[in-house]
Amino acid sequence: MKLRFLLVLLAGSLLGAERPYDPKANPAADLTRAVEQARKEKKNILLDVGGEWCSWCHRLDQFFAANAGLLETREKNFVFLKVNFSPENENKEFLGQFPKIEGYPHLIVLDSNGKLLKSQETDVLEEGKGYNLQRFSAFLAQWAPKR
């Protein structure tokens, strides 16, 4: 069990928690791969829209890194994908298929077929200068796939 937990943490670090938002990435192609993976692994998809310019986006990365149980929940239930929004690349065409985003980071939950389940401003998940573990855990639990 401990080995599995360490592998989940390592996977989270390699697949998103530490990975920067990439203005050169192709989110449509990334989403196609995420849908394939989500179908195979019976997971939903969690898009984290933000940019390297965004202090709250970095706080979100740090929040996942500091809360191993939350990271494990995310990795168990979601294919996690960062989508860049920055002056270098606003990804207008890709993000245009989703509800309008008012602030960053912004979370979008899709089912394993890529269908929109939830578009979530993260301000309701904040507390002080960070995020609220109980509210964030409840959000992930609510939008995890039903098994």
Image (cartoon, rainbow, N blue to C red):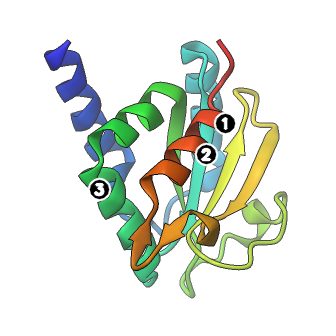
Residue 77 shown left or right of residue 52 in the figure: right
| Numbered disc 1: secondary structure | helix
Q: How far is disc 1 from disc 3 in space, using C-alphas?
A: 24 Å
Q: Which residue is denoted by mark 2 in the rendering?
A: 139
Work out which quarter of the rendered image holds the C terminus and state it: top right
Which dot marks residue 41? none
| Tag 2 and tag 1, C-beta contact below 8 Å | yes
Label 2 – label 1 distance at C-alpha: 5 Å
Dot 3 amino acid type: Glu
> In the figure, residue 66 lies in which quadrant?
bottom left
Name the residue located 55 percent from the left edge and 52 percent from the top edge.
Answer: 135
Q: Residue at x 65, y 78 (%)?
A: 103
Q: Tag 1: residue type?
A: Gln
Q: Which of the 4 image quadrants contains residue 89?
A: bottom right
Whole-percent x, y for residue 73 in the image: 44, 32
Closest to the camera, between mark 3 and mark 2, is 2
Q: Is residue 89 above or below residue 45?
A: below
> Secondary structure beneath disc 3?
loop
Reading the image, the residue beneath label 1 is 142
Query: Which of the image's four quarters has the N terminus?
Result: top left
Q: Earlier in the sequence, mark 1 or mark 3?
A: 3
Neighbor class of circle 2 (other Cα within 10 Å; few <14, some 14-19, many 20+) is few
Q: What residue does disc 3 label?
A: 18
